[in-house]
Image (cartoon, grey):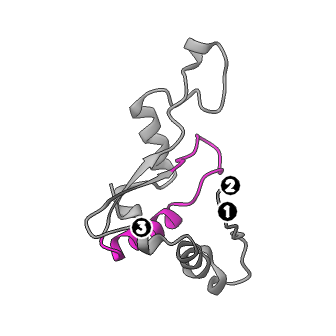
């Protein structure tokens, strides 16, 4: 049986229609999120921290919204990268936008540059 998919555009004409204020809670309610997260549950929020010099990642404020929502349900959120570090160019011989983050240190540097910190997300 196929999964049910909910789509909400991130576009808005005012802050009152924003993803984190209106559309986010509505999406989570439609998903039955409140029934899935129990008190003291560990909840991993998977995201992509982005690559150096790109903007194709969710903004930390959206991740913060999810972390705060999990906390409001009694859960303990933690944020994790969902796509890995990327293979070094000298190993593959191929340069990609992900080649520059082949070590933990390099990848954390990119995450920090894009604003992904425990303080901005409200979770480790």
- Picture coordinates of residue 94 (x, y %)? 67, 18
User: Which label was assigned to residue 52?
Assistant: none
* Residue 100 lies in quadrant: top right
As measured in the structure, the alpha-carbon distance from the residue carrying label 3 to the one carrying label 1 is: 17 Å
Query: Helix or strand or loop: what does disc 3 sit on?
Result: helix
Dot placed on the residue nearer the N-terminal end, 3 or 1 = 1
Local secondary structure at mark 1: loop
- State how far apart marks 1 and 2 are (Cα): 9 Å
How far across and how far down the image is residue 108, in percent? 42, 40
Q: Which residue is mark 3?
A: 36
Please tell me which residue is depicted at 58% across the width and 26% down the height of the picture: 99
| Residue in view at x 69 percent, y 70 percent | 8
- Which segment did they paint magenta? 47-74
Circles 3 and 1: CB atoms closer than 8 Å: no
Return the residue at label 2: 2
Q: Which quadrant does the C terminus fall into?
A: bottom left
Which image quarter holds the N terminus? bottom right
Check if mark 2's residue and mark 3's residue have beta carbons within 8 Å: no
State the residue lying farthest toward the left.
40
Dot 1: few (<14), some (14–19), or many (≥20) neighbours within 10 Å? few
Viewer-proximal residue among 56 and 109: 56
Of mark 2 and mark 3, the one earlier in the sequence is 2
Percent coordinates x, y for residue 123 in the rendering:
34, 60
Q: Tell me, for residue 5, which label it has, or none.
A: 1
Is residue 100 positioned above or below 22 on the image?
Answer: above
């Amino acid at each position: 049986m196929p999964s049910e998919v909910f789509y909400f555009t991130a576009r808005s004409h005012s802050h009152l229609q924003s993803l984190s204020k209106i559309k986010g809670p509505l999406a989570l309610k439609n998903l039955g999120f409140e029934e899935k997260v129990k008190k003291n549950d560990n909840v991993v929020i998977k995201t992509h921290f982005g690559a150096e010099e790109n903007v194709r990642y969710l903004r930390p404020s959206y991740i913060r919204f999810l972390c705060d929502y999990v906390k409001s349900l009694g859960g303990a959120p933690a944020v994790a990268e969902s796509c890995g570090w990327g293979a070094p160019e000298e190993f593959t011989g191929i340069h990609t936008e992900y080649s520059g983050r082949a070590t933990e240190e390099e990848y954390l540097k990119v995450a920090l540059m894009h604003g992904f910190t425990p303080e901005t997300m409200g979770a480790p």
